[in-house]
Image (cartoon, grey):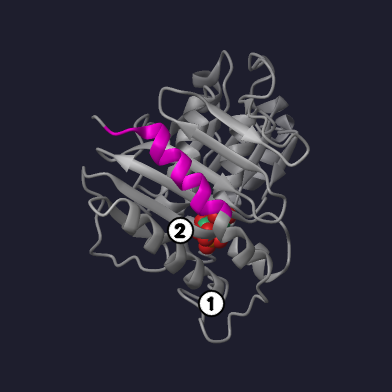
Amino acid sequence: SDLNLQEIHDFMVSVAKQAADRITTAKPTTDTAGNKKNSVDLVTETDQAVEALISSQLRTAYPTFLFMGEETYKPSDTLTTSPTFILDPIDGTTNFVHRASNVAISLGLAVDRTPVIGVIYNPFTRVLYTGIKGHGSFVETPLNPGTKTKLPLKDPEPFEGGLGAALVCVEWGSTRTGNDFAVKSQTFARLAADKRDGGAFVHGLRSFGSAALNLCEVAKGSADVYWEAGCWAWDVCAGWVILLEAGGKMVDANPGNWEPKVEGRRYLAVRAGEGQDGVIEEFWGHVQGRFEVS
Ligand code: IPD
């Protein structure tokens, strides 16, 4: 397409940075915004205000583009081939409510249902992750203002130790009952267990509480794998670009599907490095059942 991705990216970065103060100065309360699916699926007034702020700026600058956002999404909204901004105003809402700092504005652009720009900005730490399809992904931190460091941060090591040498990001998500909860909890136990008990004996399991930031950890190479089912396009669109541009790979959380969709809700992300596919197959060997969420 003839879109100027660099120019759109620069605008997305400026919009995310402008919205940051709205998050850091807020007093998080779920009182009037209420809960969504259940008592652990949190939304605050700040989520809604930040989405309104960012979406109005995007619509003004790019009136022909479509918009999909966590707080205004309706089940009838489907991703089309048109350029679509995909926003999670606060990824890590639970952290935000608890004043934990793993929080991000996650803003992506998808064209032809493919993520092409990713901007992930933590308003508290002021760390910025960006990626443009075909042009690499980068991180910029307040320690090095104005300096963009290419991802991954170090030359990726081959996966010689397989999953047994891996740091694995997982999330409980907001589903706490039924098949999908059982698949997650049984798989977590299996990943952690000693090899003598049939486990993968991973170095560690991490739940940073933000799908977007988990994907950035894998893009950096700090984490090796991120596995989740139940999150949404706005949780992953931006991180998807950043991961792929860092040499990472995204496949389905259910064993056997190498072609996940951004609007699907199951993801297995693996960092760059020789032996990625072997780690994916090894991971699938530990998944206990199949997710029903599509
Ligand atoms: C959630 C976070 C969480 C993940 C959930 C997401 P939210 O997004 O990314 O880490 O486990 O699946 O829905 O609700 O904080 O925007």
> Quick one: quadrant of the N terminus?
top left
Which amino acid, by three-letter code, is at mark 2?
Asn
Q: Is residue 2 above or below residue 187?
A: above
**Residue beneath the point at 49% across and 37% down:** 268
Q: Amino acid at mark 1?
A: Glu
Ligand 1 is in which quadrant of the figure?
bottom right
Task: Determine the residue positioned at 51% across, 78% down.
Answer: 35
Name the spot of residue 13 as percent of width and height, x first: 51, 45
Q: Which residues are magenta?
A: 3-17
Q: Main secondary structure of the magenta part?
A: helix
Residue 18 visible, this angle: yes
From the Cβ of disc 1, is ligand 1 less than 8 Å away? Answer: no
Answer left or right for 5 relative to 36: left
| Residue situated furthest right in the rendering | 143
On the image, the x and y values in percent for residue 80 come to 21, 48
Mark 2 in CB contact with mark 1 (< 8 angstroms): no
Secondary structure beneath dot 2 equals helix
Q: Residues within 10 Å of mark 1 (few under 14, many from 20)?
A: some
Magenta includes 13? yes
Q: Which residue is mark 1?
A: 45
**Residue to which mark 2 is pinned:** 179
Identify the residue at image location x=66%, y=71%: 97
Left or right: 133 with respect to 59?
Answer: right
SS type, badge 1:
helix
Assess whether residue 131 is covered by the magenta stretch: no
Q: Nearer the viewer, residue 279 or 197?
A: 279
Q: Nearer the viewer, residue 223 or 245?
A: 245
